[in-house]
Every structure is written in structure tokens, then in C-alpha cells.
Amino acid sequence: MTSLRQLAGELSAEIAMLSQVIGDLLAGDRGYQVIQQLPGIGPVLAAVIVAEIGDTPGSRTRRSCARGPG
């Protein structure tokens, strides 16, 4: 049981560190900033959403989605 608690602690620390890295990498991305304003959206989920939206040919870009309609 002790080893499982230790492993859980190490994994939690790794998750926290990776969350910080994600936040640092996307800090200047306007879409990332806007998505995080939604209730319940943290840095990791916002990064997933930004990655899924992407910039695809023939569609609105992430940056235009962040600005809103029009």
C-alpha cells in the first residue's frame, strides 16, 4: 500500500509539471486563453480543445473562432 501511495504522489507531481509546461507553451495562444474562460475548462482540457480545433483549410481558424462570429 505504501508503494501505491508513493507512486500516486509521483504521478500527481508529474501531471502538475506537465500541466505547467502545457500552460507555458500555449500562454500566448488567444484561443487557448478564451477557451479557459469557460467554466470547468482548465489548462489541459483547453489544450486538448485547441489541438482538436486546429487550423484546417477551408474552415475558420482557431484564431478566428477565438474572435467570435463576423
Image (cartoon, rainbow, N blue to C red):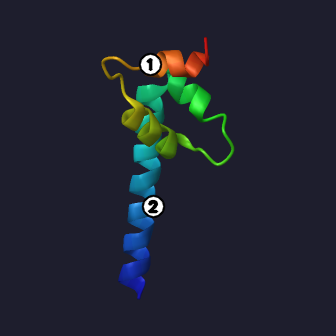
Q: Are marks 1 and 2 in contact (CB under 8 Å)?
A: no
Query: In the image, which disc is placed on residue 29?
Result: none
Going by the picture, which residue comes out furthest to the bottom?
1
Going by the picture, which residue comes out furthest to the top?
70
**Snapshot quadrant of residue 24:** top left
Residue at the disc numbered 2: 12
In which quadrant will I find the N terminus? bottom left
Closer to the camera, 35 or 17? 35
The CA distance from mark 1 to mark 2 is: 36 Å
Q: Position of residue 65 (x, y in %)?
A: 53, 21
**Residue at the image position 45 percent from the left and 22 percent from the top:** 62
Circle 1: element type: loop
Closer to the camera, 64 or 33? 64
Q: Earlier in the sequence, mark 1 or mark 2?
A: 2
Query: In the image, which disc is placed on residue 60?
Result: 1
- Above or below: residue 30 compared with residue 21: above
In which quadrant will I find the C terminus? top right
Q: Amino acid at mark 1?
A: Arg
Q: How many marks?
A: 2
